[in-house]
Image (tube, rainbow, N blue to C red):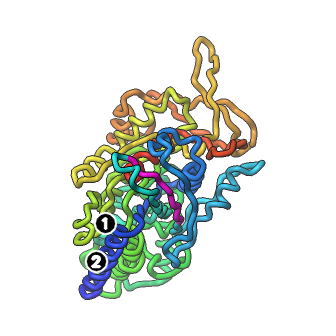
């Protein structure tokens, strides 16, 4: 394992040097990683971002576009022949059809290259011709991002963490009792191992449906070609000092280590370690609707996510000798169109509070961070409605389940985020002074004018933060 680690490190070092020199003397490339927790809208975000960078009529917040310096944008073949291409055309077709529908969610790594032709600015701009920036967008499931935190944990540490979290999750106490009653010192029985792994996987699905965020290992939810393999056949167990060789506990420990070495580490080496900028999409409204425990779980998860990043600046020499680091991280609360714009500042403040610990760590390491509330595709319109003596700020859209038009008031978010985060940290089971609802809207039919991308909320500001300095 030591020799393999050294070999991997040397290989990555050579790749970093080669890539850095190529970008320095040829056309520059910026790798943007896009991930998100469950139902955060990764596919819609990438589709709308690319569409709005190609047709920029709705991107006034992108400074280079406002100055008229983006001459053209076009899709090119992706540089990595081993990765699936992000199916931009199919996803855009789903959103812009006569009967629009949400595209399929992310289930594996994919990539797309968008090349931007830019006119330079500054005093010497008249002496220089247009230049090209290649934007390589890497899409990967958020569940896989959570796995990166496992690399620094032992099986005992991970088990202790997950057994603690089972105490407050739906269906968790029953599974916790079953795991504690298991004789982990007994010789390995493959039937018992499969049964425990299946029960733990079922609980992960139940927790995700209930709005909880930390559901690791991520490949238990998205197994792909690994389904049924021993590397996905384990579960957390209470530490057992009496467990000997070939016992259930030792075999689960071995499989956990194998999962890190053969699943998590290759993902980090091949994809994640090469990213320059990162977007983390979060369904904060869904967590708020699920209750205080889901909000606290989300806060802890966002903090843990930062341990997987290598934040910091990407100066030329540091890339050569230390490898790439993530320069900018955007934490975006999605589905802002589910709220009237009067509540958007409150959603942004909640997102800033949820990510405070994570953003402080990244800034200390030298990375820039930002928190936004956005809607990559606006699916609603705003409406003020009289309700007794009150006038409520509502949104109107097509309900996903019934196809009917409805106006919706989700409840008022608090001005002070601590009114949510305080009860969440204390383990409250329900909100005492509010009932926050979430509706599921279908995408609205679109009529796009020439030069316009899909309607959105603050996608242009997000793009300016992520790539504006390179334009």
Q: Which mark is residue 324?
A: 1
State the residue at coordinates (44%, 42%). 63
- Asked if residue 119 is among those painted magenta in the image, a careful observer would answer yes
The foreground one among 14 and 184 is 14
Tell me which segment is drawn in magenta: 112-121
Q: Is residue 143 above or below residue 102?
A: below
Residue drawn at the location 72% of the way across and 49% of the way down: 100
Query: Which residue is rendered at x = 64% and y = 20% of the image?
Result: 385
Does the image show residue 176? no
Q: Residue at x 31, y 49 (%)?
A: 368
Q: Residues within 10 Å of mark 1 (few under 14, many from 20)?
A: many
Relative to 77, is 32 on the left or the right?
A: left
Is 167 displayed left or right of 401 in the figure? Answer: left
Taken as a whole, is the magenta stretch helix, strand or loop? strand
Q: Quadrant of residue 386?
A: top right
Residue 195 drawn at (x, y percent): 51, 74
Q: Is residue 240 something one can see in this rendering? A: yes
**Which element carries disc 2, helix, strand or loop?**
helix
Reading the image, the residue beneath label 2 is 13
The x, y position of residue 312, in whole percent, is 26, 57
Point out the residue furthest to the right here. 98
Q: Residues within 10 Å of mark 2 (few under 14, many from 20)?
A: some
Image coordinates for residue 244, horizontal then vertical, percent: 28, 84
User: Which image quadrant is residue 443 in?
Assistant: top right
Q: Is residue 217 left or right of residue 91?
A: left
Say which of 193 and 274 sits in front. Answer: 274
Q: Is residue 149 magenta?
A: no
For this view, does 286 lie left or right of residue 242? Answer: right
């Amino acid at each position: 394992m030591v020799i393999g680690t050294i070999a991997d490190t040397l290989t990555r070092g050579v790749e970093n040097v080669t890539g850095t020199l190529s970008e320095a003397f040829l056309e520059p490339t910026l790798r943007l990683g896009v991930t998100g927790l469950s139902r955060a809208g990764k596919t819609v975000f990438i589709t709308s971002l690319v569409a709005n960078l190609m047709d920029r009529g709705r991107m006034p917040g992108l400074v280079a576009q406002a100055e008229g310096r983006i001459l053209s944008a076009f899709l090119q073949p992706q540089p990595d022949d081993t990765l699936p291409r992000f199916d931009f055309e199919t996803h855009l077709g789903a959103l812009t059809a006569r009967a629009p529908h949400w595209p399929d969610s992310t289930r594996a790594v994919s990539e797309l290259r968008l090349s931007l032709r830019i006119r330079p600015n500054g005093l010497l701009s008249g002496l220089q011709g247009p230049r090209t920036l290649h934007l390589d967008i890497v899409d990967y499931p958020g569940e896989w991002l959570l796995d990166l935190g496992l690399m620094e944990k032992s099986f005992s540490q991970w088990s202790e963490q997950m057994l603690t979290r089972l105490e407050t999750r739906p269906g968790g106490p029953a599974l916790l009792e079953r795991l504690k009653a298991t004789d982990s010192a007994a010789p390995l029985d493959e039937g018992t191992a499969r049964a425990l792994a299946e029960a733990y996987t079922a609980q992960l699905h139940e927790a995700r449906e209930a709005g909880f965020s930390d559901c690791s290992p991520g490949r238990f939810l998205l197994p792909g070609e690994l389904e049924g393999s021993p590397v996905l056949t384990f579960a957390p167990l209470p530490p057992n000092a009496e467990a000997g060789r070939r016992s259930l506990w030792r075999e689960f420990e071995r499989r956990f280590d194998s999962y890190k070495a053969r699943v998590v580490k290759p993902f980090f080496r091949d994809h994640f370690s090469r990213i320059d900028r990162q977007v983390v999409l979060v369904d904060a409204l869904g967590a708020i609707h699920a209750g205080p425990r889901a909000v606290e779980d989300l806060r802890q998860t966002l903090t843990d996510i930062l341990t997987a990043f290598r934040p910091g600046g990407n100066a030329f020499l540091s890339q050569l000798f230390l490898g790439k680091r993530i320069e900018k991280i955007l934490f975006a609360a999605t589905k802002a169109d589910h709220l009237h714009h009067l509540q958007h500042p409150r959603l942004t403040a909640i997102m800033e509070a949820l990510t405070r610990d994570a953003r402080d760590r990244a800034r200390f390491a030298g990375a820039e961070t930002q928190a936004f509330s956005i809607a990559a595709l606006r699916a609603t319109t705003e409406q003020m409605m009289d309700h007794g003596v009150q006038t409520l700020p509502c949104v109107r859209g097509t309900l996903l389940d019934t196809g009917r038009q409805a106006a919706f008031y989700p409840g008022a978010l608090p001005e002070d985020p601590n009114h949510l985060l305080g009860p969440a940290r204390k383990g409250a089971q329900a909100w005492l002074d509010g009932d926050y609802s979430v509706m599921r809207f279908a995408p609205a039919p679109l009529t796009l004018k020439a030069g316009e991308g899909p309607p959105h909320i603050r996608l242009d500001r997000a793009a300016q933060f992520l790539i504006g300095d390179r334009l």
